Image: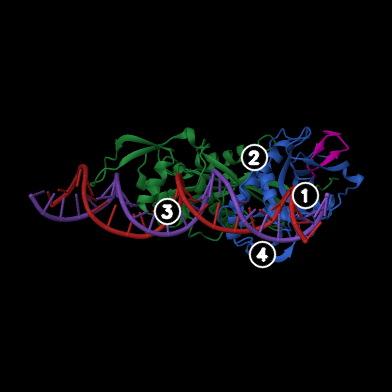
Chain colours: A blue, B green, C red, D purple
Amino acid sequence: MFQEIKTHEITTDVVIFTIKDNKLQVLLVKRANEPFKGRWAIPGGFIRLSENLDNAALRILKEKTNVDNIYLEQLYTFGDPLRYPSSRVITCAYFALIRSDDIKLSFDTSQGITEVQWHEVYNLPTLAFDHKEIIEYSIKRMRERLEFCPIAFQLLPEKFTLTELQKSYELILDMKLDKRNFRKKVLTGSVLKELNEYTKLGSKRPARLYSFDNITLNSKRGHFFS
Amino acid sequence: MFQEIKTHEITTDVVIFTIKDNKLQVLLVKRANEPFKGRWAIPGGFIRLSENLDNAALRILKEKTNVDNIYLEQLYTFGDPLRYPSSRVITCAYFALIRSDDIKLSFDTSQGITEVQWHEVYNLPTLAFDHKEIIEYSIKRMRERLEFCPIAFQLLPEKFTLTELQKSYELILDMKLDKRNFRKKVLTGSVLKELNEYTKLGSKRPARLYSFDNITLNSKRGHFFS
DNA sequence: GCTTTCAAGTGTCATTAATACAATATTATT
DNA sequence: AATAATATTGTATTAATGACACTTGAAAGC
């Protein structure tokens, strides 16, 4: 006879943000099985015994989006005994920011998923488990982080215009920013490298391109926007 | 024959800060058993199936210090596969701030502890596991939080002088602050209630007492010190 | 090739926040 | 009454923030 061992299970769930179609979007998967069969959820999975938490989150991200080497940050660990029906599952949530252009979504059916899709964060469907709470918390955190370090770069292509950068800030903060003050601020921040290149397409005045100066990313302190 | 089920275990460890003897101190317990027998460690324990993470941390805090209803915040979850020898233990770390006066430390021997003691954070003994890293991370976090909300109140008695408050900021930030600027800042913050009471003891000019206006604790935004 | 269109780009002023800095006030003690 | 020790208070300078509107340059249409 087997001994029934009742233990905690531990997963990681990853809130993956992108900017797409001029909207702040989050990646959701549709569940193939109970509980919450047919509901949308944040991608997640069990943490393997031999991998650390960051790597587990990176693996899940890679499974769904096929990208690696991206901005990923531990968010919070959710462990209410009732958050999961019928068993105790504690989840260590992460959030990630990626560019949606150069990725194609993927999954295999063995993972209990029937669909993978971007959804606008301000217009979410009903979600499985406590995933709505997790997404709301990660938006809050992302906004806080944005004040201190320019993580919005992670959402943009390598070369971008200041208008594009401002737009991404506005989408994350869900507010309008003043163009001149924005430029003043990001340019004095010394995290931008001014390029001698300009946008080509578009029938209007070309805009100067900038790139992100990686070296100063982590050392950068001070506020961006309140 | 038993099936060997190899699973993660999940604990919570709580970094408990106090100010005592004019020093910022942290509560450590001495381990009775292997691994790390005889070493100092942060108090911690397994999370029960029926309790949520906050409650687990509160329970551990209560077991060691016999206090409840105190400031407690989830810090970070540490899950390196090698952080624990011989098994996989993921820990959800918390930190807490308490007044050391009105508590007496306690433990029972069934918990694998031979001693409980305060230690100065800037002069720690060799610690078990990755607990040094956890403490360092919580100091960093505490300093960040101090910029935004006046958590230092948690370290002081109900009624306190501005000099005492400033001292606690200085101990946490490990730097000297200007007296006039400090007072200007905390008084404009509208989190302090000015009392019509003064210190009695001491042979010098009595200092006015203040108390903390609880109502505005969570709503308080804006920076305190950089 | 001239005009129109549209986003890109730019500067100042006013207000507020941050910092540096030192003399006076109050009580207890002698 | 003088002394000792800590509490209390203000100003001037500098930096950061926020509000605000016109000029520039390339492409497209005529």
Q: Position of residue C5 (x, y in %)?
A: 75, 47
Q: Position of residue A120 (x, y in %)?
A: 77, 40
Q: Name the residue beneath numbered marker 3.
A: B170
Q: Give the residue displayed 67% in from the left and 46% down from the top.
A: A170
Q: Name the residue beneath numbered marker 1.
A: A47
Position above or below: A189 against A178: below
Position above or below: C8 against A77: below
CB within 8 Å, label 3 to label 2: no
What is the number of the mark on residue A193?
Answer: 4
Q: Earlier in the sequence, mark 4 or mark 1?
A: 1
3 or 2: mark nearer the eye: 3
Q: Does residue A42 show up magenta in the picture?
A: yes
Q: Give the residue displayed 44% in from the left and 35% down from the top.
A: B213
What is the number of the mark on residue B53?
Answer: 2
Residue A54 seen anywhere in this rendered image of the structure: no
Q: Are marks 3 and 2 on the same chain?
A: yes
Query: Of the residues shown, which amino acid type is indicated by label 3?
Result: Glu
